[in-house]
Image (spheres, helix red, strand yellow):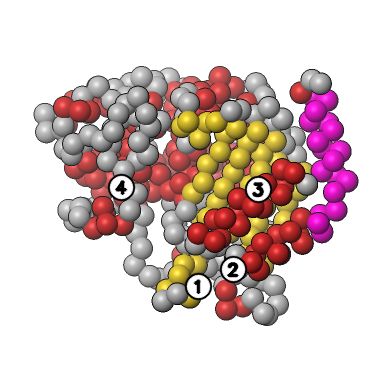
C-alpha cells in the first residue's frame, strides 16, 4: 500500500470515530491520574483530524463548571528545543550559519578561558547533545551558578561562557542531554543573525508563520489561563504564577507556551517537510532536524521512523510523536508535571494511535 492510500484510509478512520470516545478515554485518564486539564490532537499534513480540550484550569475547580477552552496555552517545556532547532534550520537555509560551524570560529575570544574538551564543538554537536556539555536539567545545578546580570540575552551569554569552563561529560559518540548546550547554541544563532533568540521567535513564528506563543508560563502572560500543578506535602496544588521560578538561562531549551491550535500548526509544518514538501524550511532541512543522529537528532528523539519529544518544567507536561511512515502526528498536553500525569499522557497517546 502506498503512502497516499494509507493516509487516505487513516483520514477516513479518524472521521468515522466518534470524538466522544476520545473524550471518555481522556476523562477516565484525567480522573485516574489527577490531571486537571488536557488537550490533545491528531495532525496530518493537510489538517487537524481531531482536537479536544477538556477539564479545568485549577485542580480546586474540578467539581465546578468546566473552564477549559481551545485558547488555553500549555507550557511546552523541552519541546521548545524543536523550535530552537527550527530557527537554526532557517538560518542555515539562509546561509547565515552552517551545521558544522564551530563555536569558537564565531567566538574566538572565548577560547582561551574555555575547557579544551570543547575546542571543536559545532552547532550540530550542541543541538544533538553531542558536545559533552554539562546537563543543567535540575534546579540544584542552577543554584550553584554565579549571579548573572543583564537582559536575558546577556545573562545567557554569561551562562554559556561559564559552562564552557567546566569539564565535559560523557562521550560525543552518544548523546548527553543538556539544556545548557541549547543555550550555548543559541548564542551562535544570535551572533550570526544580529537578533536575540526572543526576537527570532517573534519574527519567524508570530510575524511570518502566524504561530502565536508566549515565553514562560501561560498565566504569567495571559488572563484566564491554566495553572501548572505540582505536589506539595503529598497533595497536588496549583502553582502560583508569582512563585520564584526562573527558566530564562535555558529559555531556548524549554520555556515557550502555546495553545493546541498553534502547536498543531508547528507540528504540521514538520510533517509537510518530512513528506518532502518545502515550506518555511527546505524539506532537506526538516529531514536533518529529525534524523541527523540516531536516538536524538535536533530537538527530536529519533527512533524507528518515529520522531518524538517530551517536555516538562515540573508543572506542565507535553508530549508529541510523529509517525514518519504514516505522516501522522499525535499531541497531548496537560497542566500537571507529576509522574502520574506523565503516565496519563503516554496512555492517551497510545489511545490516539490505536483507536
* Camera sees residue 143: yes
**Residue 61 location (% of width, % of height):** 61, 78
Q: Nearer the viewer, residue 326 or 65?
A: 326
Q: Are marks 1 and 2 in contact (CB under 8 Å)?
A: yes
Mark 1 and mark 2: span between their CA atoms?
Answer: 8 Å
- Which secondary structure, mark 3? helix
**Residue 22 location (% of width, % of height):** 76, 55
How many residues crowd around disc 3 within 10 Å: few (fewer than 14), some, or many (20 or more)?
A: many
How many residues crowd around disc 1 within 10 Å: few (fewer than 14), some, or many (20 or more)?
A: some
Residue at which label 2 appears? 34
Q: Is residue 7 magenta?
A: yes
Q: Residue at x 57, y 78 (%)?
A: 60
Which of discs 2 and 4 lies nearer the camera? The answer is 2
Residue at which label 3 appears? 349
Dot 1 or dot 3: first in sequence order is 1
Which of discs 3 and 4 lies nearer the camera? The answer is 3
**Residue 141 location (% of width, % of height):** 26, 52
190 sits to left or right of 2: left
Dot 1 or dot 4: first in sequence order is 4
Find the magenta span and give its range: 4-21
Residue at which label 1 appears? 236
Amino acid at each position: 500500500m502506498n503512502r497516499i492510500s494509507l493516509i487516505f484510509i487513516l483520514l477516513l478512520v479518524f472521521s468515522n470515530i466518534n470524538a466522544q470516545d476520545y473524550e471518555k478515554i481522556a476523562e477516565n485518564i484525567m480522573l485516574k491520574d489527577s490531571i486537571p486539564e488536557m488537550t490533545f490532537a491528531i495532525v496530518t499534513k493537510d489538517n487537524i483530524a481531531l482536537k479536544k480540550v477538556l477539564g479545568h484550569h485549577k485542580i480546586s475547580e474540578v467539581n465546578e463548571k468546566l473552564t477549559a477552552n481551545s485558547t488555553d496555552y500549555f507550557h511546552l517545556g523541552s519541546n521548545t528545543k524543536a523550535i530552537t532547532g527550527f530557527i537554526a534550520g532557517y538560518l542555515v537555509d539562509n546561509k547565515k550559519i552552517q551545521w558544522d560551524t564551530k563555536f569558537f570560529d564565531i567566538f574566538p575570544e572565548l577560547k582561551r578561558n574555555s575547557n579544551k574538551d570543547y575546542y571543536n564543538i559545532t552547532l550540530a554537536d550542541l543541538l544533538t547533545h553531542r558536545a559533552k556539555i554539562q546537563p543543567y536539567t535540575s534546579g540544584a545545578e542552577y543554584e550553584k551558578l554565579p549571579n548573572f546580570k543583564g537582559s536575558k540575552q546577556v545573562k545567557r551569554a554569561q551562562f554559556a561562557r561559564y559552562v564552557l569552563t567546566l569539564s565535559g561529560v560523557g562521550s560525543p559518540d552518544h548523546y548527553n542531554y543538556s539544556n545548557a548546550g541549547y543555550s550555548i547554541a543559541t548564542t551562535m544563532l544570535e551572533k550570526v543573525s544580529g537578533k536575540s533568540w526572543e526576537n527570532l521567535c517573534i519574527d519567524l513564528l508570530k510575524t511570518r508563520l502566524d504561530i502565536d506563543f508566549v515565553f514562560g508560563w501561560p498565566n504569567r502572560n495571559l488572563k484566564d489561563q491554566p495553572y501548572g500543578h505540582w505536589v506539595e506535602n503529598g497533595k497536588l496544588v496549583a502553582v502560583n504564577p508569582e512563585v520564584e521560578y526562573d527558566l530564562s538561562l535555558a529559555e531556548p531549551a524549554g520555556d515557550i507556551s502555546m495553545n493546541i491550535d498553534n502547536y498543531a500548526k508547528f507540528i504540521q509544518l514538520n510533517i509537510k517537510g518530512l513528506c518532502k514538501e518545502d515550506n518555511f524550511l527546505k524539506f532537506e532541512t526538516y529531514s536533518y532536524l529529525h534524523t541527523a543522529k540516531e536516538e536524538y537528532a535536533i530537538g527530536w528523539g529519533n527512533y524507528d521512523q518515529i520522531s518524538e519529544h517530551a517536555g516538562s518544567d515540573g508543572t506542565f507536561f507535553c508530549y508529541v510523536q510523529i509517525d514518519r511512515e504514516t505522516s501522522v502526528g499525535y499531541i497531548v498536553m496537560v497542566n500537571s508535571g507529576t509522574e502520574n500525569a506523565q503516565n496519563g499522557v503516554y496512555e492517551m497517546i497510545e489511545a490516539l494511535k490505536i483507536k
